[in-house]
Amino acid sequence: MSLISRTRAFTGRRISVDIDKVRFPDGSSGTLEMVRHPGASAVIPFLDPLESPDPRIILIRQYRWAAEDVLWEIPAGTLDAGEDPLTCAERELREEAGVVARTVRHLTSVFTTPGFTDETIHLYGAFDLTRVPSSHEADEFIETHELRWSEVGRMLRDGTIRDGKTMAALMWVQCFSRHP
């Protein structure tokens, strides 16, 4: 595919929307509406060593207007202009979970919904935590919860956890770090 033309239809605080005219692989052309996003980082805060039989993690609950529901999530946030994803993960740990980590390890990066957005979320695990005061943004109404890994697994299975980035990060750890 190749870009023929691009028109910026909207610029907001966090996203922009482009109307892209593209040439498809078969030679035909079409118009695609693309949400442009600077990317984000999300992080699983581990209160216990990963190797523990049933480690505790911190999950947050917050109301999400788009979902019209309160969701269970790992701390996450949008990258500031020019910000390194690791720096963003560390900032969100402090702001949303009220912890700083001695070690933050990159797990993987995922496209959220590549059919209409270029958003990439960088997923991390945070270890050896120290409590600090949290500082939520004005539009964040967050509760933090300490949960055992076994409980988090149950919440994934029964559909209590429905946030995609959270599901991806937790399952990645279970598949590749807990039981390699």
Image (tube, rainbow, N blue to C red):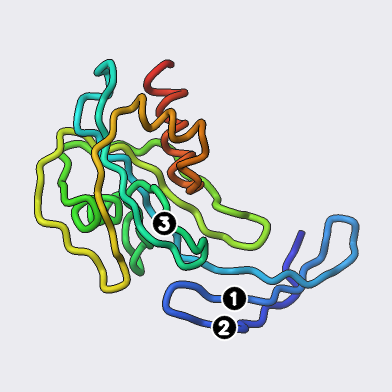
* Label 3 or label 2, whichever comes before in sequence order: 2
Q: Nearer the viewer, residue 144 or 99?
A: 144
Could you say which quadrant of the image residue 59 lies in? Answer: top left
Are dots 2 and 1 in contact, CB under 8 Å? yes
Residue 92 lies in what quarter of the image? bottom left
Q: Residues within 10 Å of mark 2 (few under 14, many from 20)?
A: few
Amino acid type at circle 2 is Phe
Residue 160 relative to residue 19: left or right: left
Residue type beneath disc 3: Val
Q: Which mark is residue 70?
A: 3
Residue 4: % across, % down = 76, 73
The numbered mark, 2 or 1, whose residue comes first in the sequence reads 2
Indicate the quadrant where residue 105 lies: top left
Q: Indicate the secondary structure of the residue bearing disc 1.
A: strand
Q: Which residue in the structure is indicated by mark 1? A: 17
Q: Which residue, given by chain and number where applicable, does mark 2 sit on?
A: 10
Q: Residues within 10 Å of mark 3 (few under 14, many from 20)?
A: some
- What is the x, y in percent for residue 42? 36, 49
The location of residue 152, given as percent across then percent down, is 38, 32
Tell me the distance, in whole angstroms, between the alpha carbons under discs 3 and 1. Answer: 27 Å
Name which residue type carries label 1: Val
Badge 2 marks a residue whose secondary structure is strand
Mark 2 vs mark 1, CA separation in Å? 5 Å
